[in-house]
Image (tube, rainbow, N blue to C red):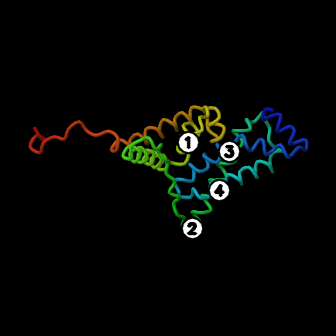
Amino acid sequence: MTDSQLIREIKEGNVELYSELMSRYQRKILAFVYHMLKSSNMELLAEDLCSETFYKAFRSLHSFREVDASFSTWLYTIARNTVLSELRKQRSGNVPLEESGVVPVAPQENAPEHAVLRNERVMLVRDAINNLPEKQRSAIILREYDQLDYQEIAGILGQSVSSVKSLLFRARSSVKTQLEPYFFEPMYEPYEGMKNR
């Protein structure tokens, strides 16, 4: 069944089919929510906010119209708004939260020093993305992690396609600038006596 067929059935009363719809998007929405929360060290709330997203979507499914957006775009928009609402709430309450410390595990066949370097690079890239302004961060997560096209991202962020392209350009440039000191070393350092010749 397509998303449209499932939604039609759910609207007609077959609410048990909502679990099928959830299973199609749960991993993607959870990953998106997790990445959005990472910059505020609130990853521990990812599963709760993912569940809240699906609950809100279920409650509002009767108002969903495919002519306005695809189901996935609509769902990502709900997820984004849920996260932004939680971030505002936490900022106003100044509630301290600890970092989860989730680090990708390298395959055992690799030497330990390579695993450490790879994990360090992954963390550097994540930190660079987390330092971006909210719209740039959302755009790059949706594009690079969730592999959405420009039109879908535009729908989720409420922007034009050209604005999304601009956001992505600025986001990638910023990430590159942040990472340059770690990945691109200068060819040589001028000797002390040669600086002003």
Determine the CA span between mark 4 and mark 1. Answer: 18 Å
Q: Position of residue 69 (x, y in %)?
A: 73, 36
Residue placed under numbered mark 2 in the picture: 95
Q: Position of residue 93 (x, y in %)?
A: 59, 67
Q: Position of residue 132 (x, y in %)?
A: 48, 47
Under mark 1, the amino acid is Ile
Determine the CA span between mark 2 and mark 1. Answer: 25 Å
Residue placed under numbered mark 1 in the picture: 141
Residue placed under numbered mark 4 in the picture: 85
Mark number for residue 77?
3
5 sits left or right of 111 in the view = right
Disc 4 secondary structure class = helix
In the image shown, does 176 or 16 lie closer to the viewer? 16
Select label 1 or label 3 by which is in front.
1
In the image shown, does 45 or 23 lie closer to the viewer? 23
Select label 4 or label 2 by which is in front.
2
Residue at 68% of width from left, 51% of height from top? 50
Tell which residue pokes out farthest to the front in this image: 109
Determine the CA span between mark 1 and mark 3. Answer: 13 Å
Under mark 2, the amino acid is Val
Determine the CA span between mark 4 and mark 3. Answer: 12 Å
The first of marks 1 and 3 along the sequence is 3
Disc 2 secondary structure class = loop
The first of marks 2 and 1 along the sequence is 2
Determine the CA span between mark 4 and mark 2. Answer: 14 Å
